[in-house]
Image (spheres, coloured by chain):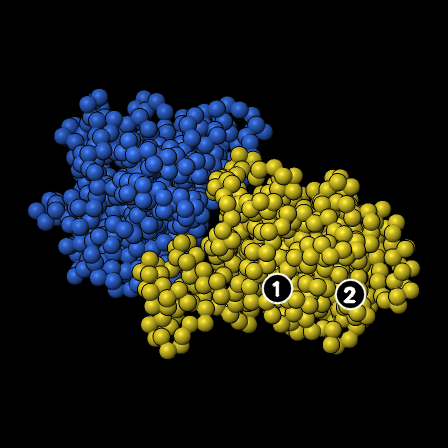
Chain colours: A yellow, B blue
Amino acid sequence: MWLSVVVLVHVLLLISNSVESQSIIDTLPGFPGKLPFKLETGYIGVGELDEVQLFYYFIESERNPKDDPLVLWLTGGPGCSGLSGLLFEIGPFTFDYANSSGNKPMLELNPYSWTKIANMIFLDAPVGTGFSYATTWEAYNSNDTSSTTQTYEFLRKVMAHPTFLFNPLYVAGDSYSGKTVPIIVQEVSNGNKIGHSPPLNLKGFVIGNPLTYEIWDGNERVKFAHRTALISDRLYQSTKRNCQGRYIDPDPNNMQCVEDLRKVNECLDDIYAAQILEPNCAAFSPKPNKLWSLSLHLDDNFIDILHSAPDQVPEPWCRSYNYLYSYVWANDKTVQKALHVREGTKTDWERCNKSLTYTKNVITSIDYHQNLTKKDLRALVYSGDHDMLIPYVGTQQWIETLDLSIKDDWRPWFVEGQIAGYVTIFTEEKYSLTFTTIKGAGHTAPEYKPKECLAMIDRWFAYYFL
Amino acid sequence: MWLSVVVLVHVLLLISNSVESQSIIDTLPGFPGKLPFKLETGYIGVGELDEVQLFYYFIESERNPKDDPLVLWLTGGPGCSGLSGLLFEIGPFTFDYANSSGNKPMLELNPYSWTKIANMIFLDAPVGTGFSYATTWEAYNSNDTSSTTQTYEFLRKVMAHPTFLFNPLYVAGDSYSGKTVPIIVQEVSNGNKIGHSPPLNLKGFVIGNPLTYEIWDGNERVKFAHRTALISDRLYQSTKRNCQGRYIDPDPNNMQCVEDLRKVNECLDDIYAAQILEPNCAAFSPKPNKLWSLSLHLDDNFIDILHSAPDQVPEPWCRSYNYLYSYVWANDKTVQKALHVREGTKTDWERCNKSLTYTKNVITSIDYHQNLTKKDLRALVYSGDHDMLIPYVGTQQWIETLDLSIKDDWRPWFVEGQIAGYVTIFTEEKYSLTFTTIKGAGHTAPEYKPKECLAMIDRWFAYYFL
């Protein structure tokens, strides 16, 4: 079905002299046999001259593609590839860590893929992310507003596929996408209103451990560290008093505050901020976790590890070892050929491209959220409650400022008889927002609690109570 | 060496017409080959007529028995067997879960046994616990003060072994032993002062997630639940206000408080209180976790599971499945024979005997702690920071009331480059108290973080900084 319009699209695109492509992928290096689901990859050109070529992975729902939602997934960063979300969070396969080697990463099926219940598009955006590229140097410059406009353009062009035009559409993502998803949703909503074609069947959006406002989210790390026994009551009270709640970018002349923050850093520097109970592998990175740098990139500079013998990889096992294979796999020429990546467009695939020429020109997405509460939309906000990068306490705080009515207040929800998290449902006329914690999960919650997160999204898409 | 005085002791005991025994154990059912450490089991009679027969396991240090400390370990409950501490926490072996079956539990070595660095006595106390028994019905009655007096008597009789008389002696235990250990330490200290023989070379004590005062520790569960994202800010504030901090045994006429506590219970009832991130297996117990019952027993009524086929044991894996094997193993006649358990003295061995005739006649051990701060002693208090039974926030609180000077304030300590917890050192003239969290650990911390807890105890015994 999806393919059926490809020819038409191709013709149209050839006419407009742009470079677009779609390919159905049947097999992939590292995966034994044929793929048991429908995978399509391709480029869609956006911008006036299609100078930005956004690469995407489309996977059809393994349940009922005709009725299941269509979900656009944006991994955070900015600069983290959609493939990272696909391979480590909610996609249909993952690396078979036990049977992989540095030369030969092997893929296995993820039983908790969101493609079990939804049609998923994983997008390499903004430009420069993953396999996305630009045809001019200028087009590599992007920012929050230009990249979201490009993503909206991508969505409309994708919807030239009329097959999924009537499926419920959700825009989703985590981490830095907490900034961009609400903007995209607003663009879609506005576009529909002013009659952009095609009209998109937008139902709502999903954001996980979302960045909303660097200063707020960063400040809340101190409260979170106190709650999770990483800093003492005494130090917390003193830091709060001396810094007056301003921990990010404090007054350098406020010596008491500076001294307190030095102590806070001493307690937190060696914590793996993305899941505070997991080992911290910063030792293999040139720089330790920069908790106060506002960076959301999780350092994983693996080049040295890749070149060292396997028995030199030190104990204990670090989650980031798992990411190693994505570098090897996605930079393998046979893999890129299988994915129909255009030759010569990228020198290196990176899980998270840290050298984007990207300007963060939207300070906070809170105003966008405020606007969205006036619309007929559903929002799901989930937080792995062991994440210190974007702690749930900060997410709760900005949700409170939206001043919505509470429909269902903080109660446990269950997966296989176990508490999977706690949910609160807020409403405002036609708008509803579900906030939930994912108990024990880290920054990219489905990576840590895949079963629970699939149950969450399945129930929520189906309008059930969590 | 230990054995060398056994003959003498035997002769003395035969004269006094009491029933005492010591046996060296070379092999044990379920463990392949000879034991690679020195294990002795035996009974020591205490009370006027030795009517209480306390069973113990002595394991010589695998490092330097002559100089390493001698540690008396008491598992909590009251009523939890020393064998439980030995098999699941800090002893030299543990069940080989993967290779055990319901008929044939297999033992394997625990690389993080405290016997790597200390001479350890695991004691079945108070009377009725584990293989300890009484020769009269009346003698089965015990309470905090009588049982601690009996344990002190046990210690003096054990020290009739002059071999370990000059080793540094530590009294240790966890959970309910937070009540009894300080009392025993005080008895030893007082006994030394008034010239009891033999004088014991007491250096200090160790308590893990210790119960200090049921009401305090219980009340702090609400604060802990709030900090760990199990109850909401709103509910926490409301409960605090309405119940005025009194959550255990609240005023039943205070309807707002009762209603808030109902909601708190709804959030916490299905949490595995001993480690809030692990699955709760209460489904297999006749009663769910009774968080407000003040009980410290972790329910593990396995009789039904034992009689069901292995494939009926439901997912997910629960830590308590591991406890199953201790019932099978310790109730096996060949095992009891190997351990030199006296035939006919006990009908069933239970990991935690819940039918003791035991009166909790000491409300709080805080007064004992207060007294001990006047002495030349070292205390180590550690708290697995994911335990809701005796949360670290409550333990911190009573330590604060001791009003000691802070020598070293809340800083991280490391095991293999990873933060293992946070330590604070308090002093008062000759007294010092080290308080530390064990990051990510539950109620019985060494069961969850064995490597970290061995590093902790090794460094502390050696007077190093953690």
Q: Taking B444 as reference, is B206 left or right?
A: left
Amino acid bearing label 1? Gly
Secondary structure of residue under mark 1: loop
Q: Residues within 10 Å of mark 2 (few under 14, many from 20)?
A: many
- Specify the quadrant that holds the C terminus of chain B: bottom left
Say yes or no: labels 2 and 1 on the same chain.
yes
Q: For the image shown, how many numbered marks are present on the structure? A: 2
x 31%, y 44%: residue: B241
Residue linked to disc 1: A77
2 or 1: mark nearer the eye: 2
**Is any atom of residue A389 visible in this view?**
yes
Check whether the beta carbons of the residues at disc 2 and disc 1 lie within 8 A of each other: no
Q: Which residue appears farthest toward the front when viewing the image?
A: A194
What residue lies at 39% left-to-right and 64% top-to-bottom? A245
Q: Nearer the viewer, residue A4 or B450?
A: A4
| Residue B242 picture location, percent across and down | 31, 41
Question: Where does residue A286 sit, x and y in percent of width and height?
Answer: 55, 72
Q: Quadrant of residue B29?
A: top left
Q: Chain of mark 1?
A: A
Disc 2 residue type? Val
Which residue is at the front of the view, A385 or B41?
A385
Residue A306 image position (x, y, % from top left): 65, 66
Outermost left residue: B194
Chain ID, mark 2: A
User: Regarding mark 2 in the picture, which secondary structure is present there?
Assistant: strand
Q: Which residue is mark 2?
A: A46
Which residue is located at x 31 percent, y 35 percent? B294
Give the x, y percent position of residue A353: 66, 68
Q: Residue at x 50, y 45 (%)?
A: A405
